[in-house]
Amino acid sequence: GGGPVGRRGAAGIKGPRSKALDCARIGGEMYKGICFKGALLKGDKDQTPEGCKPFAPKKAWEEGDWWKLAQMFHTRDITSRIDKGAAGGLCDNHMAVASFTQNRHSLKVWVNSATFHFVPTGSGATCTLHNGDATMAVYACAV
């Protein structure tokens, strides 16, 4: 069977850079095709993670998407139960995509209205990003 193996062919066309690879390079994690990074907040202002060019993806994500992100970036034990008080809210006053306090009882949640569609508060909203100790903010990063 058959003659000797021929020469190696020419290299193929170079494809687009891998978003997942670029995301890993800045220490981020992929969710639904978007690169995310978390940052523990020191106060009620954005704290952009290192290497992240933040943006708010135009989506209509629900509570389940928020919970997936919370599970990816929490640094303490958390619950999926959201505190339905006024702290946090569905707002557009920060660059973050979401933030949440971290405990086992109920979490105060802020979500970006460009990305999310659900209201994490009961009556009214303070629109504060930082709502207590160990508030984690999650950022979408352009890579």
Image (tube, rainbow, N blue to C red):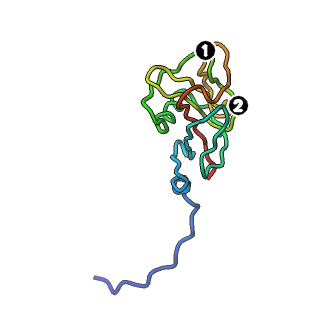
Q: Residue 121's x, y, as percent? A: 60, 18
Q: Residue 32's x, y, as percent? A: 53, 42
Residue 122's mark? Answer: 1
Height in image: 74 above or below 9?
above
Residue 94, quarter of the rendered image: top right
Q: Quadrant of the N terminus?
A: bottom left
- Disc 1 on helix, strand or loop? loop
Residue plotted at (52% across, 42% down):
31
- Along the line of sight, the residue nearer the viewer: 83 or 34: 83
Q: Residue 33's x, y, as percent? A: 55, 46
Residue 138's mark? Answer: none
Q: Residues within 10 Å of mark 2 (few under 14, many from 20)?
A: some
Q: Is residue 31 left or right of residue 110?
A: left
Amino acid type of disc 1?
A: Gly
- Along the line of sight, the residue nearer the viewer: 89 or 43: 43
Residue 92's mark? Answer: 2
Height in image: 62 above or below 15?
above
Which of the marked residues, 1 or 2, is nearer the chain's N terminus? 2
Name, please, the residue furthest toward the left. 1
- Along the line of sight, the residue nearer the viewer: 103 or 113: 103
Q: Are marks 1 and 2 in contact (CB under 8 Å)?
A: no
Residue plotted at (60% across, 35% down):
42
Name, please, the residue furthest toward the bottom. 4
Q: CA distance from mark 1 to mark 2?
A: 18 Å
Q: Give the number of marks.
A: 2
- Disc 2 on helix, strand or loop? loop
Residue plotted at (56% across, 44% down):
36
Q: Residue 19's x, y, as percent? A: 56, 54
Name, please, the residue furthest toward the top. 123
Amino acid type of disc 2?
A: Asp
Q: Residues within 10 Å of mark 1 (few under 14, many from 20)?
A: few
